[in-house]
Image: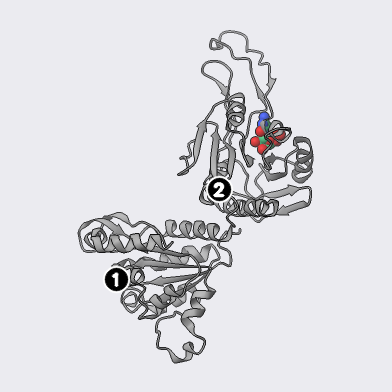
């Protein structure tokens, strides 16, 4: 199993807040994703979580003191800032946020943040009155305008016995925000304002007013790709069959039921710079029976009619063909062979092959949260290790951004 964070160097700055007791959980999550995580703890932070615990759980010595002569020979604050792919301040106390907003550099943590050129992600944690205080809000606005990203604190009971906004965000959310920030950082800016059409989910083909033909597609991969493209600045039209996924923020969603409706929605969304067809479109539909088939009659003879192949039609367009057309091939056997022949037949640029049969090393592509993909192009096959569909989306959109960079 691989992860988008595999080998990424993360510097976690722990400042003085009771929420620092959640840092061990956070470290476990980052290590589970194979991130190379290092900790720096402020004096205040070390009152809540010991440097010994941070060192044991991160697997690295913990940075603390700016006046450590042995370390300053290598100008440690600059080195720590430079080596990190991302710096996360979690928990960030009101005091540390104020320091950052004013550019103070009077301890190792604030000096490192001031010397940073990698993305900085801040997860505040404090009493709700401190959070709502105009001074804190002013500092946050200032830092946001400097490009610092915030993971908003949550509402709930606080250590002081009061209830309100100010609890440290869930460690899982901090991990996923780190992934998003790294993805935006590593991808070039070539997707900004580009229009992408993404199809996702199954289609439902009615048999009669109550029954339909369907498949097990969850839409998860397509939704994750749409969200990742949007994060990189693309305008996204997401055409979906009936699924239960929430629409990603900032994505324009068109809901359809049948393959014919999906085709019409895709046509209406053109022109586009890129089109990614993750939907498991039903290959056939039926002539709709106006009334419900009755059990006491003979079993109906269902006549199947071929559905339009949306991917193939868009990829073969003479006018308005998107620059990059990507199809998915869900196969139960001869995965790569079938994918190669689909690449030719459908006329698309990339086919992403995934298996619908679960094996010891790879999950089934249908329904679950994980997948293993092979990107088949005229140039050959690129196989990725099993990872979450969200991580696949982040890695895939970075590859798409590179494609557009080369095409420019
Ligand atoms: O031929 P097959 O269904 O395996 O092809 C899969 C690819 O073609 C997927 O990208 C799918 O979204 C697309 N497709 C389509 N319209 C169809 C059938 C498949 O766009 N009617």
Per the image, label 2 sits on a secondary structure element best described as: helix
**What is the x, y in percent for residue 327?**
68, 40
Q: Residue at x 49, y 85 (%)?
A: 75
In the drawing, what numbered circle is on residue 229? 2
Query: On the picture, is 258 further left or further right than 60?
Result: right
Q: CA distance from mark 1 to mark 2?
A: 35 Å
Q: Residues within 10 Å of mark 2 (few under 14, many from 20)?
A: many
In the drawing, what numbered circle is on residue 23? none
Q: Earlier in the sequence, mark 1 or mark 2?
A: 1
Q: Residues within 10 Å of mark 1 (few under 14, many from 20)?
A: some
The quadrant of the rendered image in which ligand 1 is seen is top right
**What is the x, y in percent for residue 281?**
63, 31
Compared to 89, does 78 lie above or below? below
**What is the x, y in percent for residue 275?**
63, 40
Q: Which residue is mark 1?
A: 95
Compared to 275, does 74 lie above or below? below
Mark 2 vs ligand 1: CB under 8 Å? no
Per the image, label 1 sits on a secondary structure element best described as: helix
Does the image show residue 176? yes
Query: On the picture, is 21 further left or further right than 367?
Result: left
Does the image show residue 125? no
């Amino acid at each position: 199993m691989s992860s988008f964070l595999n080998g990424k160097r993360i510097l976690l700055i722990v400042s003085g807040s009771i929420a620092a007791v959640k840092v061990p959980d956070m470290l476990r999550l980052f290590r589970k994703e194979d991130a190379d995580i290092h900790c720096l703890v402020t004096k205040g932070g070390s009152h809540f979580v010991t440097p010994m615990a941070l060192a044991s759980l991160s697997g690295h010595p913990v940075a603390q003191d700016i006046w450590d002569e042995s370390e300053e020979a290598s100008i440690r604050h600059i080195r720590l800032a430079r080596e990190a792919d991302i710096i996360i301040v979690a928990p960030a106390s009101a005091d540390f946020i104020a320091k950052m907003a004013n550019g103070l550099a009077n301890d190792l943590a604030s000096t490192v943040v001031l010397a940073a050129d990698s993305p900085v992600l801040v997860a505040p944690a404090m009493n709700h009155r401190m959070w709502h205080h105009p001074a804190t809000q002013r500092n946050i606005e200032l830092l946001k305008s400097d490009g610092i990203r915030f993971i908003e604190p949550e509402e709930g009971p606080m250590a002081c016995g009061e209830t309100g906004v100010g609890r440290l965000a869930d460690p899982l959310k901090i991990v996923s925000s780190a992934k998003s920030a790294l993805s935006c950082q590593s991808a070039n800016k070539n997707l900004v304002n580009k229009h992408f059409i993404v199809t996702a989910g199954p289609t439902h083909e009615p048999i009669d007013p109550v029954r339909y033909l369907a498949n097990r597609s969850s839409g998860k991969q397509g939704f994750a790709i749409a969200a990742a493209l949007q994060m990189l600045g693309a305008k996204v039209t997401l055409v979906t069959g009936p699924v239960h996924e929430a629409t990603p923020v900032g994505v324009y969603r068109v809901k359809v039921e049948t393959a014919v409706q999906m085709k019409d929605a895709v046509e209406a969304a053109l022109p586009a710079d890129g089109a990614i067809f993750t939907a498991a479109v039903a290959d056939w539909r039926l002539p709709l029976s106006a009334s419900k088939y009755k059990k006491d009659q003979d079993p109906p003879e269902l006549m199947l009619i071929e559905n339009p192949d949306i991917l193939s039609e868009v990829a073969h367009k003479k006018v308005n063909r998107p620059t990059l057309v990507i199809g998915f091939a869900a196969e139960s056997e001869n995965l790569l062979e079938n994918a190669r022949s689909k690449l030719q037949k459908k006329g698309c640029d990339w086919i992403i092959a995934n298996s619908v049969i679960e094996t010891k090393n790879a999950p089934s592509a249908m329904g679950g949260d994980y997948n293993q993909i092979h990107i088949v192009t005229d140039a050959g096959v690129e196989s990725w290790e099993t990872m979450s569909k969200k991580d696949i989306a982040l890695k895939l959109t970075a590859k798409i951004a590179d494609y557009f960079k080369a095409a420019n």
